[in-house]
Image (tube, rainbow, N blue to C red):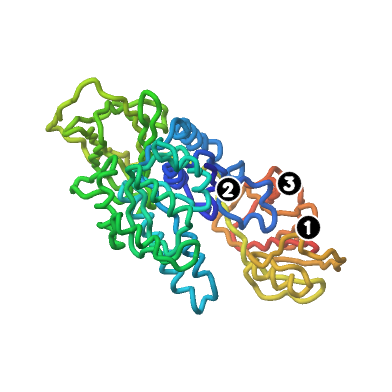
Amino acid sequence: MLSELYGVTGWEFDFRGHKLAGDWQAALGVTVRVHHLTWTSMAGEAKRDYPASIGYQSPWYKEYPLIENYFSRLNTVLSRGKAVVKIGVIHPIESYWLYWGNKEQTQGLRDEMDERFKKLTEWLLFGLIDFDFISESLWKSQTPDDALLSDEAFSVGKMKYETILVPNCLTLRSSTLERLKVFQKKGGRVVFLGELPRFIDAIPSDEAEVFSESCEKIHFAKENVLNVLQKERLLDVHDQSGMRTANLIYQLREEKDREWLFFAHCNAMPNPDLPKREDLVIEINGIYEPVRYDAMTGECCESVYFHKEGKTVIRQTVYDHDSLLYSLKPAAEEKEDEKTEAAEKEYEELELESYLDAELAEPNVLVLDLAEVKVEEEPWQKEEEILRLDNKLRERFGYPKREEAFPQPWVMAEKDKESHLIQLRFKIFSDIEAEKTALALEEVKNTRLFLNGEEISTKADGYYVDRSIAKVPLPRLHRGEKYPDHTGKI
C-alpha cells in the first residue's frame, strides 16, 4: 500500500514525529512511503510552504537515513507472507450515500453516521482486534458466484475470516446478503451491529432483517463490540496498572516458519520532551519463542517472556515514540516465568560539569521583517510588516497577492505591466562592533544596497539556507543604529 505522508507537519516536526507518523501507517499496511516534500527552490512564496524540505535546506537531511533505514528494515518484514486477520467488517459507505443530499436535511444524519464509523474503527484498532473492511462493490469479484457453490472454505480474495460484522448498514447489496448467507452456512459467524438494514439494493426490503434472526445482534457500544469479538482476539496488551493499553495498534503476519508481530504507538506524544515510560505485558495466543528485532539499529534482542495457559507472555518497557517488532517461531518447549527482584531503573543520575562548551551550528540571524517604503519619488511611508507591505504594493499596481491568495501560474493572464522603483529601509541596532556580517536576500542581481546612505557591493559570497537566497558580505557594523536600504524594481 502506498501513502503520501508528512504534509502540513511544520518546520518544527522532528525525527520522533517522522517515526511516529510513519509507524501507525506501517501498522495499517503502508509499505511504500511518498514523502512530502523536497524543494526545488524556496524562492518567493515557496518558502512559506510546509513541512520542512527533506533536502539541503534543512540542516538534518544528511541524517535522515536514520529514519529511512528504519522503515526499510520494517517494510521488508511487513511485506512478507500475509496478514493474520479473523474479522471482516462490511464498509457502510453505501448506506452513507443514501443520505447524500442537501445539508439542511441530511448533514446531521451524515455527521452521525460518520461519527459512528470513526468510533467503530477506533474501538477495534485501539482495542487490539485487527480487521479488514469489506467493500461491497468489490466483494462479488473477490468471492465469485462459482465459489459460492463449491465445497471449499469461504474466502474473500485471499482472506478467510471467522466473523463478519455488519455495522449500522441501512442498505446492503443483494450480492452482499447472498454471500453473508453462504458464509454463515459454511460455518462463519455473522454479527449485526446497531441498526438493521431496511433496504436491499436501496429498495425497501425485510430480507436482511429476516436473515438477522439467525445471526447475533448487538447494540452499538464499545464493550459490546469487544466482548462479542473476544473469541477472535489474537493478542492483548496491558500496562502496569492492568488496564488494556489504548495507545497501540498492531499488525500480525505469517510466513512459512514464523509469524511477525509489529506494534506502533498511534497517539501524539503529550510532551515530546518528557517521554512517558510504559511497562507492558503482551499476551499472544500460542507457544512461541519471541525475538525482538530493533529496526532502528538492525540488531536482534532477547525478550523477557514465559508461557502460561497456551499463551506467550512478554514483558517489555517502552516509551511514547517506541515501536516493537517481534519474530515469533514455535517454541520446542514451554518456559516458566522467571521473576527477578531487580527491576529496571526508571532513571539514571548524571553529574554535569558547571561549565560546558557550546558552539553555534550556523551564524546568528536577525530577521528584517519591518521596513519603511518609498515608491519612485514619493515620500517615505511609515514602517510596516514586510508581507503586508508586499500585498499593499501588489494591490496598488495590479499584481497577484502573496500568501494564500497567490494563484497558480497557469490561471494568471499574460499581460505587460509597468515596472516601479521600490526602496525599502530597515532599522537595526547593535550593542557591539560586529565583523563578518552578511545580508541574505533574493533577487540580488536586480537590487542596489545602501548602508547608512552609502552604496555597498552586491557581490554574493555563497548562499543562506537556499541557493535562491544570496549572502552578501557587509562592512564592519559599528555600535548603534544602522539603516540598510534595499532598492529594486517590481
SS for callout 1: strand
> In front: 342, or 348?
342
Q: Select label 2 or label 3 by which is in front.
A: 2
Q: Is residue 472 visible?
A: no
**Residue 36 image label:** 2
* Residue situated furthest front in the rendering: 149
Residue lying at 34% horizontally and 32% vertically, measured from the top left:
326
Q: Is residue 182 visible?
A: yes
Looking at the rendering, which quadrant does residue 303 occupy? top left
User: Does 339 sit left or right of 320 as displayed?
Assistant: left
Q: Is residue 383 left or right of residue 343?
A: right
Based on the displayed image, in which of its 4 quarters is residue 389 positioned?
A: bottom right
Q: Nearer the viewer, residue 187 or 355?
A: 187
The disc, 2 or 1, on the residue closer to the chain's N-terminal end is 2
Q: Look at the numbered disc 3 and give the secondary structure of its residue.
A: loop
Pointers 2 and 1 in contact (C-beta within 8 Å) = no
Q: Which mark is residue 246?
A: none
C-alpha span from label 2 to label 3:
31 Å
The residue drawn where x is 58% and y is 48% is 36
Residue at (32% x, 43% y) in the render = 187
Place of residue 77 in the rendered image (x, y in percent of width and height, measured from the top left): 44, 31
Q: Position of residue 167 (x, y in %)?
A: 38, 58
Identify residue for label 3.
460
Question: What amino acid type should be assigned to the residue bearing mark 3?
Answer: Ala
Residue 49: percent from the left, percent from the top?
A: 61, 56
Q: Residue furthest bottom?
A: 104
Residue pointed to by mark 1: 448
Q: In terms of sequence position, does the residue under pointer 1 or pointer 3 come before the other?
A: 1
Q: CA distance from mark 2 to mark 1?
A: 36 Å
Query: How far, Cα to Cα, is label 1 from label 3?
Result: 12 Å
